[in-house]
Image (cartoon, rainbow, N blue to C red):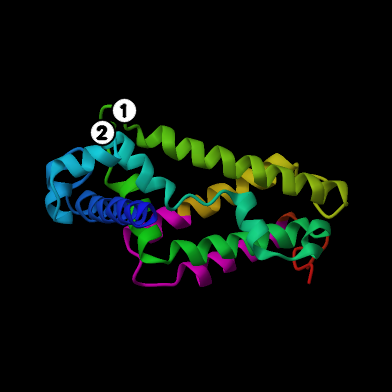
Amino acid sequence: MARRTKAEAAATREMLLDAAEAIFLEHGVARTSLEQIARHAGMTRGAVYWHFRNKADLFRAMLDRVRMPFRELVEEIDEPSLANAPLEAVRLACRQGFVRLEQPRYRRVYAILIHHCEVFGEIDPLAMQNEIAQESCGALIEYFGVAAQQQRLREDISPEQAARLLQASLGGLFHDWLRNHEPYSLVERGMELVDTLLRLVAREPGASAER
C-alpha cells in the first residue's frame, strides 16, 4: 500500500509539472499563478503546495527534468574507445544533446527558460542559464584539453578558445531554433555546425572524425 501511495504521489507531481509546462509556455512564468497550474492539472492549490514550496521550487523541478550535463551525455554513449578520442566524444555528446532537445518536453522547457521567463521573485532565468552554460563550457574545456595533450588540437587554439567557440555557435543556433523550430531539424543543422567547427579546431583535416 505504501508503494502504491508513493507511486500515486509521484504521478501527481509529474502531472503538476506537465501542467506548469503548458501554462508557463502559454502565459509566461511571471503571469502564471499556482492556482492556474492546479486547475490545469485538475487539482487544488493545496496539492501544489504538498509537492512544492512555491513557484520557484516548482520551476526548478520542471527544469531539473530536462537537465543534461555534458559529461552525462558522453557517459550515455557507452563507447569505451571515446576515452582516447576526445573530439569524437564531443561530437557524439552534441548529437545526443540535439536528439534530446528535439523531444517536445525538452523544447518546451528550454523555450520557457529562454523566451518566456522574466526575473521574478526567487526565479532568475539568467542565473539558471549561466549555470547550465558554465557546466557545459567547463566540460568542453576538459575534453579539448585532452585533445591538446594528444596533439589533436591546433597549436594556435587553446582548449578554452575551442570550447567557447563551439558553445557560442551552438548557443546561437539553439536560440534561433527555439524561436522557430519548424523549418529544420536541430540534429541535422547542429551536426553540420559541430562537424565544421571540429574540423576547424583539429590539428589536421579530418582529425575531428576519430572513427
Q: Residue at x 37, y 51 (%)?
A: 2
Q: Does residue 2 appear left or right of residue 198 in this picture?
A: left
Mark 2 / mark 1, whichever is N-terminal: 2
Residue 18 circle label: none
Quarter holding residue 4: bottom left
Q: Amino acid at mark 2?
A: Asn
Question: What residue is pinned by disc 1?
Answer: 122
- The 10 Å Cα crowd at callout 1, few under 14, some 14 to 19, many 20 or more, is few
Mark 2–mark 1 distance (CA, rounded to whole Å): 9 Å
Near-viewer residue (12 or 119):
12
Residue 115 position in % (x across, y down): 30, 47
Residue 169 position in % (x across, y down): 54, 52
Residue 114 position in % (x across, y down): 35, 46
Where's the C terminus, which quadrant? bottom right
Q: Residue at x 30, y 56 (%)?
A: 8
- 57 versus 199 height, above or below: above
Near-viewer residue (182 or 62):
62
Question: What residue is pinned by disc 2?
Answer: 54
Q: Secondary structure at mark 2?
A: loop
Q: Which residues are magenta?
A: 173-200
Q: Residue at x 86, y 46 (%)?
A: 149
Q: Is residue 197 visible?
A: no
Q: Amino acid at mark 1?
A: Glu
Prevailing secondary structure of the magenta residues: helix
Near-viewer residue (123 or 201):
123
- 32 versus 187 height, above or below: above
Residue 187 belongs to the span the image colors magenta: yes
- The 10 Å Cα crowd at callout 2, few under 14, some 14 to 19, many 20 or more, is few
Q: Does residue 109 appear left or right of residue 50 in this picture?
A: right
- Do residues under tags 2 and 1 come within 8 Å of each other at their CB atoms? yes
Residue 105 belongs to the span the image colors magenta: no
